[in-house]
Image (cartoon, coloured by chain):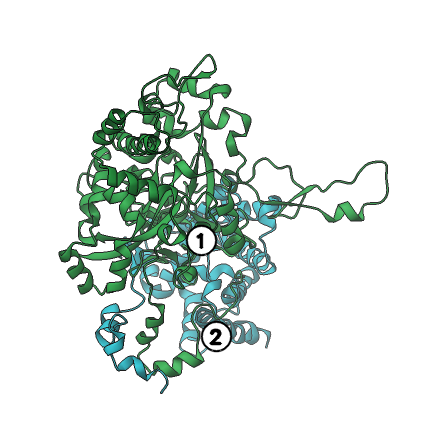
Chain colours: A green, B cyan
Amino acid sequence: MDVRLQVSMVFHLDKCIGCHTCSIACKNVWTDRKGAEYMWWNNVETKPGTGYPTKWEDQSKYNGGWEKKGNGKPELKMGNRASRLINIFHNPSLPKMDDYYEPFTYKYEDLFDSPEGADQPTARPISMVTGKFMDIEAGPNWDDDLGGSPVYAENDPNFEGLSPEEQQELFDVERLVFFYLPRICNHCLNPACVAACPSGAIYKRGEDGIVLINQEVCRGWRMCVSACPYKKTYYNWSTGKSEKCILCFPRLETGQAPACFHSCVGRIRYLGGILYDADRLTDALNVDDDKLVEAHRDLILDPRDPVVREKAKENGIDERTLEACERSPVYRYVKEWKMALPLHSEFRTLPMLFYVPPLLPVMAKTENGVYETANDELFSPIEKARLPIKYLASLFSAGNTDQVSYALKKQYAVRLFKRLETVGDVSQEVVDKALAECGMDAAEAEAVYRLTSLPTMDERVVIPPMHREEAMAMLDDDMWEQKGSAGFGFREAPVRGA
Amino acid sequence: MMDNLLFIVLPYIAVTLFVVVSIYRYITDKFSYSSLSSQLLESDELFYGVVPWHIGIIGALTGHLIGFLFPKEVLWFNGVPVRLYILETTGLVFGLLALIGIVALMWRRIRVPRIRSVTSTVDTIVLVLLFAQVVLGVYTALFYRWGSSWYAASAVPYLRSLLFFQPDIEMVKPLPHIIKTHIINAFLIIAIFPFSRLVHMVSLPIEYLWRPYQVVIWNWNRKKIRGQYSLSNAKEDSELNVIGR
């Protein structure tokens, strides 16, 4: 047993209101720079929809992620190592800038400097790449709330499993239902970006599992961009280096929540430590698609288990870190309650960002425009939900509908449980049946309710102590001298090479 | 005098710059080492330039290197006409590939506005020098026949004399102007190498073929730190109390 710590995340989609505050917080802190304008390390997309970059989930287009192989060793979908070097001059599966969008601003000075005339002056859009006038054809969140068109929903790659009738029913604009999917880097346990990097510039930090790109080692071979099935590594066209979400590690190291977590208006974001067994990673990667979520969950270890604690300490994980893991909201949602699921497990990167699938809309099908409320259970059952389970399963459990159903049923049961308590218009039998169906007792239902609806910042974000203050001890030769005379990180400005 | 300047002084300056500046730049400004790929901005036309260019130039440079390292063997190989024709044709094909590639790349760089906006002065100089070099090379291959043989017999001894610090330019003096320009231009390219994006050549990631797929870096050796003084039992630990010393 090789116990390691992963700073892990849960996004509760039932709470996401799609306000993009997270994206803006991230943009302002990290990517408001030349060459990074088009990057959204955090983005929120509308689902069903095509997302950012367009159709990122379609791996027949981008060749991201891993593929299960007969020999028990998963291989990158892009091909083997040699193919990476052969394609190094021209990467055939690299997204183009237009798959994201061409960044633009407006020529605002025209509003002030234009000569007097019959017409109002306008601020024409200019490209932030070329500096020339351009016609805007796409932008960040161009398809937000589906932009009033069924086009984006129709092209969602997750609809492949649905019959044309089922699909058509969803696409009638009047009946269209959607939810929001905020995405950041998943800081995977089996990151495809790391494996694809010819320079070895991308690495996972042993201490907390954060995946980073060393900007001084990156040579701009761009393989990470296509290898990441989530398209969460980006190529900076100005500096010629790849960049990605760093999970705000400078903030984490000082005990602050990452910017997107901190600013989240819906309070949908949970962060906490997870202990996992690194020895069993390959086992979890070699199961069939429908078993992936379960295998992934099996890797996660109980921080209260004495054996696990013993092994963790052998690996140098501090007692206080273990304490933080015990309080981890991620552990509860993912392992204890099985309510949070990884996004697209079938990419086989073992993403460590989990999603509680959305239960909405509560009031399901309508009859002649009137919501049907006349049933014992108040809410119509999840099987009748307007958003098909199959669709959610394609997103969150590699097609395994049982996993998604279970997560939804649990949310549903908690709702009924609280409804009985606060309003009292459902019967005890209905509640008991709903709880029993997902093997939940009243105490657990209450705990789920508390952590979902009323968590404080300290309950949502439990940062394992990073002990940065101890890093100094690594500097063997006179650390006290070093402390006062040298810093870490960049000593030169990150300027594009000639 | 001019010959001395161009064939002795220039080469030594060029190679010195190449070595010293490359190392200095690598040590002081690793961040600037990048392929500076522009594929994100324009991908389709790039393919028709960048692939033939790299195949062509790698083939051509390898040919020059083999001639430089094994001149006698090359001469022996060329002793049989059929083998000579095969070698010459191969060289010419690589040269033409490089020519097609660089023309496509220049055309793209001039025409596509996004690419123009990421083009520096040094990029332009490098492109012009490389283009000139390839044109001169292909011209030589076409009109000064059996270059693979006379290169081994005349240019290689000159290059080797430079390597051993006993410069002897007698062999290059009588060469035609086209070929002389080819040699001088080569040294100009070597001189500008460390100042340009050409440095991406020296970071060819060969070790990728055998390194493990996953890379995990432990920033601190926790066992070592905690072995000495753990924060969890800081109170009992006298080591921590010496911070002020």
Identify the residue under disc 1. A242
Residue A168 at x, y = what percent? 43, 17
Task: Examine the rendering and report whether any part of residue A139 can be seen.
Answer: yes
Identify the residue under disc 2. B16
Left or right, A22 with reference to B112:
left
Q: Nearer the viewer, residue A144 or A83?
A: A144
Give the class, few, some or many, for how many residues have Cα within 10 Å of label 1's Cα (few <14, many ≥20): many
Residue A321 at x, y = what percent? 27, 61
Left or right, A304 with reference to A64:
left
SS for dot 2:
helix
Q: Gap in Å between the C-alphas at discs 1 and 2?
A: 32 Å
Q: In which quarter of the image is residue A291?
A: top left
SS for dot 1:
strand
Instruction: Tell me: residue A231, above or below residue A206.
Output: above
Question: Among all residues in the image, which is located at the extreme bottom?
Answer: B245
Instruction: Tell me: residue B104, above or below residue A304.
Output: above
Question: Among all residues in the image, which is located at the extreme top?
Answer: A368
Q: Say which residue appears at 36% left-offset and 42% top-offset.
A: A452
